Image (cartoon, rainbow, N blue to C red):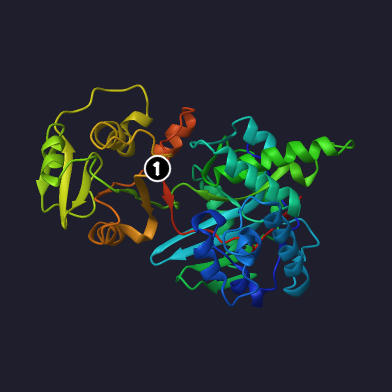
Amino acid sequence: MAIIRPFNALRPPADQAKKIAAVPYDVVNTSEARALASGNPLSFLHVSRPEIDLPPGTDIYSEAVYQKAAENFQRLIETCPLQKDQEPSIYLYRLIMGEHEQVGVVACCSVDEYEADVIRRHERTRPDKEDDRTRHMITLRAQTGPVFLTYRARRDVDVMVMEVTMTQAIFDFQADDGIQHTIWRVPDPVRFVQTFREIQSLYIADGHHRAASAGRARAQLRARNPEHNGDEDYNFFLTVIFPDDQVQILPYNRVVKDLNEMNPTEFIDKLALSFVVTENGEPTPSERGRWSMYLKGKWYDLHLREVLPGSSSIVDSLDVSVLQERLLEPILGIKDVRTDKRIDFVGGMRGTPELERLVNEGAAAVAFSLYATTMEDLLRVSDAGEIMPPKSTWFEPKLRDGLLIHAI
């Protein structure tokens, strides 16, 4: 059973929502965040990436950064102002990007269910990133950005969602990147709570570090509270829950800085021992089991010469896994994509033009365009208790931080 809980959202007035709304903290670096927030004192990046308001070179994990986050958060509460809803509510959040549209349920989910694997995961987390978000939550006593969850779509939920979207929205704006963001407050949250109890599992699509950090923050706050009873807000974490048939996964492509001491001819000759290599390929693979490679101004189509033997592991059959096991490690010498500085990743809307640019400008020697991982892949991996390789999925469009905040 999936427990969802209404909450008293801390939120901006409608006329300030566009200024407040910010991309997730982990999709931009410090310089990108500073540029996005420039000239906009209301941007939530001042809270989620507060180092942008400190001298260049400041350690992003220093005490000064977290104190700046608290200071900026309090300033936003007072000057925006951010106001808390008087009644606990559930909300709907719609994203429109071009022809794509998805509507999710905004509610708090149970840390207990996350730890019991009712809310399933497919990705490992890094301790340093967990440390950062845990400290951020505890310093602010708030969860400022949601975890992106999904579930196997249900007609009864779809009907309830459609009914609410026919009412007046509390926020409706187009961000500078062209994405439309619309949020409604659900008039009867009990219906959603009761219906979600019939859903067996929820799945983390994006936001594994936020979910893990919510668990760690709960443990610390519980230890400080001798009156703990399990109903406190810190026992729940902020989520947006989308049906799986609306979620869009885009390719998460790879670029490698060098050819592992080979010239292009030697590299292709070695590649041809395991792959059929065809010149003048398309920039995007046409189907699963094919990869597109950009090298010296030319696209190539790749597919394995021999069919791989069946594997009991769902993960082993993923295109991202096959590329790693058959090409990146044995031919280019990249053993761990999480730590090797010779590889980088290009996800989402930047697409193949960005791969071409990086190779043409000499920032990379070769680029690989992948067929996107599917939602069914993600659900099957999560159900099996397996872990996807790093950088397997890129979800687009992105939710915005700062619109609905959960105080803990």
Q: Give the total of numbered labels.
A: 1
Q: Amino acid at mark 1?
A: Ser
Between 223 and 182, the residue placed more toward the observer is 223
Which of the two residues, 134 or 196, is positioned nearer the viewer here? 134
- Label 1: which secondary element: loop
Question: Quick check: can you spot residue 407?
Answer: no
Q: Position of residue 186 (x, y in %)?
A: 67, 60
Measured along the vertical axis of the image, is residue 93 above or below residue 176?
A: above
Which quadrant of the structure image shows residue 401?
bottom right
156 relative position to 64: left or right: left
| Residue at image coords 31%, 23% | 311
Is 174 drawn above or below residue 67 in the view shown?
below
Quarter where residue 4 is shown:
top right
**Which of 224/30 is in front?**
30
Q: Position of residue 101 (x, y in %)?
A: 45, 61
> Residue 188, image x and y in percent?
70, 56
Mark 1 neighbour class, 10 Å CA radius: few under 14, some 14 to 19, many 20 or more: many
Is residue 279 toward the left or the right of residue 166 in the image?
A: left
Residue 55 at x, y percent in the picture: 62, 65
> In the rendered image, which quarter contains the N terminus?
top right
Tell me if I can see residue 256 in this picture: yes
For the point 52% across and 70% down, the residue is 35
Q: In the rendered image, which residue does mark 1 sit on?
A: 392
Give the vertical position of 211 relative to 330 (above or below): below
* Residue occupying image coordinates x 74% and y 36%: 219
